[in-house]
């Protein structure tokens, strides 16, 4: 999609839907424009030729409206079904998550709470970062979106993912990175004068890289405690 | 070809009851008038002046986007706060202070009494009050640009909590002024709408049945009904927002039991029908112009009216497509995807009927016709790209990107630019009694329509590439600085400057024709509708003797008649 890699598991489905709509409306668009310009050319004013008196109730002419119109309705039905299928898969389904990550929006930065070495949120070994989100390729993440002040929107173009962040609520969703690399995280809902600097980066790492990052960044005090817990 | 229609012989200045024809003072005649035509001009000129301001704002923020950090000629360096204020007020002004006053109030006031054949609006003093309140709202929104903190910077949709809290938007004074200005503007249009509906229903000329009314009047009346039916919830919402801002209530504050998403529902329940409120007058203007310059009857006049009513009703059931990812229950998106895609059914039918109207015509590409045809061609782009956004699954990616910006500009610039210029070039001879230069009109047309596509087509690609909205400088986003994205932003900006420069051709043509244009006859386009049967310009009271109607408005090229048009008031 315009050079934006698809690094999330549902990016392909959304791109596929966009292509489907492009083909279906593209055909109608070019047909309508073609007919339009041809009529302008064909029926340009000419000396001695008078316009025809047509009311639009003639059956043989109405066909030219009604048949395309029925076909348009069929295309509409295809688009509705395809759009809802993608929507349900992305927004209404919550696949079993390997890990959770809390994403907190505030004017004008993202705070990410990673689960840390124990793989669980809200434990002492959670890793808190500003503007940098570290995830492991191939894992399914459930995100918990929260806002400290105004509306924000958690947008990761390489995942084709976007979800508004609303103060007073925790909104959940999911993603599954399928490609390594470092990409933009945006705030896609205007949130004040710093909206344009509210940028983050997502680092999609291999399992080894990610483990190294987790070990290197876990809070010092929390590591032995977590290890101790594990022995009980 | 320049034959004049058969006119009712009548005394040119016969007195009409209730209308004084004595020369009034300038103040009485132009500023305190109850004449629908003067009020139409007041709305139109105010709207066009606001278009220059809203257009200047677009120039400033587009320059910032193309050349971030560089001083903009005529403005200076743009700060992030100023950038937010510019995009917010550009949107607000272009919708509420340009499209609505010019298309709905301007053409509505001018055309309805003249096209249905009556001497004035039913409530002329309410009409005058409507403009006065509108003028007040204009002054409030303009003043809000200059208060401490600068213009409101919470986007034209004004989502709380950003819009509700001065600590969040940092433009506390102008945020409140923005709400007040918008609420006043709504009151003005409620008063105007009452007049339009009542006049079209009660004051039609003898013999004029509902299906003898020109399409533009049908469209403006339908638009007024849509506006009046949808704006109530938003006025209530605006009052709650005002209380949140000034009295510290918590209607939209989750910490105090409120809900910010409530505003979004109230805003878009109005906001989506509002699109049709400004679209319909433009569609009506285009239909009437196409019939005149194709010398054709409208293809399926009644069907078009039914599709308009269908679209209007459906437009009340699509609002949440603006909120797919706003945090509403995701299951709701499925309902609104269906209603949104279904609205393409009447709209597609209407587009087909417009195109079919050209079939069998005798098409002259005069300036008004160029604008009308340009409208149809460009609006199709806005129409089909809406399907992408109505498809909930695709909207997850497109929401709040430049794809959305490009899409709605492809609906709004045909409406506000092409529709307005179409109407002005069509009715200028009637309004001011002089002809505009067709040559300059064509230069203006091509100088507008070509660059406008180079403004907005790049934005579709920028949106596909991930450019999100209302960002004053993309250099904070490495993925959005890769080639060719900065070049596309520059292309859009340069095209805007080119388009802007051609508007001076229009201004020159407008003013020059007003003063020096050749005198217009009563009916220079050989049109059927009633406004062309009176003087150009029509006197106060419109006709010396009010017309009687014998047929519909589109009887062009009727077989076995010498003339290829048949005015509505000509006895059979």
Image (cartoon, coloured by chain):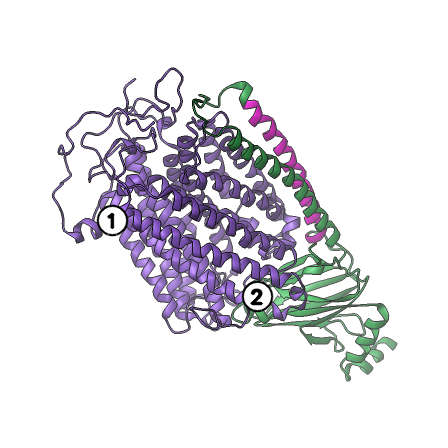
Chain colours: A green, B purple
Q: Chain of mark 1?
A: B
Identify the image quadrant of the C terminus of chain A: bottom right
Q: In the picture provided, is B269 more to the left or to the right than A219?
A: left
* Circle 1: element type: helix
The image quarter in which residue A206 lies = bottom right
Q: Is residue B383 above or below residue B490?
A: above
Q: Which of the two discs, 2 and 1, sits closer to the camera? A: 1
As drawn, the label of residue B128 is 1
State the extent of the magenta-drawn residues as a range: A62-91
Q: Nearer the viewer, residue B75 or B152?
A: B75
Q: CA distance from mark 2 to mark 1?
A: 44 Å
As drawn, the label of residue A167 is 2
Q: Is residue B362 above or below residue B426?
A: above
Q: Is residue B555 above or below residue A40?
A: above
The image position of residue B443, as x and y in percent, is 43, 47
* Circle 2: element type: loop
- The number of numbered discs placed on residues in the rendered structure image is 2
Q: Give the class, few, some or many, for how many residues have Cα within 10 Å of label 1's Cα (few <14, many ≥20).
A: many
Name the magenta segment's main secondary structure: helix
Q: Nearer the viewer, residue A170 or B343?
A: B343
Q: Residue at x 71, y 53 (%)?
A: A90
The image position of residue B564, as x and y in percent, is 37, 23
Q: Chain of mark 2?
A: A
The image quarter in which residue B17 lies = top left
Q: Residue at x 27, y 54 (%)?
A: B132
Q: Nearer the viewer, residue B561 or B197?
A: B561
Q: Residue furthest bottom?
A: A221
The image position of residue B137, as x and y in percent, is 33, 58
Q: In the picture provided, is A224 more to the left or to the right than B280?
A: right
């Amino acid at each position: 999609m315009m050079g934006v890699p698809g690094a999330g598991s549902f990016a392909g489905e959304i791109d596929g839907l966009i292509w489907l709509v492009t083909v279906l409306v593209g055909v109608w668009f070019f047909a309508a424009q073609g007919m339009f310009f041809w009529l302008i050319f064909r029926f340009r004013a000419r000396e001695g030729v008078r316009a025809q008196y047509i009311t639009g109730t003639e059956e043989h002419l109405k066909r030219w409206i009604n048949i395309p119109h029925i076909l348009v309705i069929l295309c509409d039905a295809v688009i509705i079904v395809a759009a809802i299928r993608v929507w349900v898969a992305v927004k209404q389904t919550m696949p079993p998550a390997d890990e959770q990550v809390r994403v907190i929006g505030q004017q004008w930065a993202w705070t990410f709470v990673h689960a840390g070495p124990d793989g669980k949120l809200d434990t002492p070994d959670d890793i808190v970062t500003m503007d940098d989100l570290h995830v492991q390729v191939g894992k399914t993440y459930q995100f918990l979106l929260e806002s400290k002040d105004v509306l924000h929107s958690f947008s990761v173009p390489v995942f084709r993912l976007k979800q508004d962040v609303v103060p007073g609520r925790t909104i959940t969703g999911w993603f599954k990175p399928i490609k390594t690399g470092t990409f933009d995280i945006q705030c896609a809902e205007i949130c004040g004068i710093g909206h344009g600097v509210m940028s983050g980066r997502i680092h999609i790492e291999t399992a080894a890289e990610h483990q190294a990052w987790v070990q290197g960044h876990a809070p010092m005090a929390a590591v032995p405690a977590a290890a101790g817990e594990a022995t009980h | 070809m320049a034959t004049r229609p058969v006119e009712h012989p009548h005394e040119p200045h016969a007195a009409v009851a209730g209308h004084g024809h004595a020369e009034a003072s300038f103040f009485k005649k132009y500023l305190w008038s109850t004449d629908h035509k003067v009020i139409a001009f007041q709305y139109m000129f105010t709207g066009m002046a606001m278009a220059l301001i809203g257009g200047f704002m677009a120039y400033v923020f587009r320059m910032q986007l193309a050349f971030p950090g560089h001083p903009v000629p005529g403005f200076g360096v743009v700060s992030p706060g100023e950038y937010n204020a510019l995009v917010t007020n550009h949107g607000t002004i272009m919708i509420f202070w340009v499209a609505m006053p010019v298309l709905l109030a301007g053409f509505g006031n001018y055309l309805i009494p003249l096209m249905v054949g009556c001497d004035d609006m039913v409530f002329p003093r309410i009409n005058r009050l409507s403009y006065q309140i509108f003028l007040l709202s204009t002054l409030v929104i303009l003043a809000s640009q200059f208060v401490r903190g600068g213009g409101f910077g919470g986007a034209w949709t004004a989502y709380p909590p950003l819009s509700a809290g001065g600590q969040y938007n940092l433009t506390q004074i102008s945020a409140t002024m923005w709400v007040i200005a918008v609420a006043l503007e709504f009151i003005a249009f409620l008063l105007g709408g009452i007049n339009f509906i009542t006049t079209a229903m009660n004051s039609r000329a003898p013999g004029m049945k509902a299906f003898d009314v020109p399409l533009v009047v049908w469209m403006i009346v339908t638009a007024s009904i849509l506006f009046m039916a949808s704006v109530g919830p938003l006025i209530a919402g605006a009052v709650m927002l005002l209380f949140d801002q000034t009295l510290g209530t918590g209607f939209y504050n989750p910490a105090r039991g409120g809900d910010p998403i409530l505003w979004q529902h109230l805003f878009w329940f109005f906001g989506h029908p509002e699109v049709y409120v400004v679209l319909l007058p433009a569609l009506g203007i285009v239909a009437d112009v196409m019939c005149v310059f194709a010398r054709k009857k409208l293809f399926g006049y009644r069907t078009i009216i039914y599709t308009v009513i269908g679209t209007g009703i459906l437009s009340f059931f699509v609002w949440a497509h603006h909120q797919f990812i706003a945090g509403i229950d995701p299951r709701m998106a499925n309902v609104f995807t269906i209603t949104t895609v279904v609205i393409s059914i009447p709209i597609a039918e209407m587009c087909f009927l417009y195109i079919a109207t050209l079939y069998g015509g005798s098409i002259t590409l005069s300036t008004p016709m160029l604008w009308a045809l340009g409208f149809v061609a460009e609006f199709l782009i806005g129409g089909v790209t809406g399907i992408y956004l109505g498809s909930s699954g695709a909207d997850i990616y497109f929401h709040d990107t430049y794809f959305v910006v490009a899409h709605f500009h492809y609906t709004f610039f045909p409406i506000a630019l092409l529709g307005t210029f179409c109407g002005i070039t069509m009715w200028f001879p009637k309004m001011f009694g002089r002809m505009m230069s067709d040559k300059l009109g064509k230069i203006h047309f091509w100088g507008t329509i070509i660059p406008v596509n180079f403004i907005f087509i790049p934005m579709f690609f920028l949106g596909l590439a991930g450019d999100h909205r209302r960002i004053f400088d993309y250099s904070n986003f490495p993925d959005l600085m890769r080639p060719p994205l900065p070049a596309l932003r520059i292309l859009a900006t340069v095209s805007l400057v080119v388009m802007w420069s051609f508007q001076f051709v229009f201004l020159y043509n407008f003013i020059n024709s007003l003063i020096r244009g050749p005198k217009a006859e009563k009916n220079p386009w050989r049109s059927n509708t009633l406004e062309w049967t009176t003087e150009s310009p029509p006197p106060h009271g419109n006709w010396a003797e009010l017309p009687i109607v014998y047929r519909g408005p589109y009887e062009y090229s009727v077989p076995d008649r010498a003339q290829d048009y048949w005015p509505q008031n000509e006895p059979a």
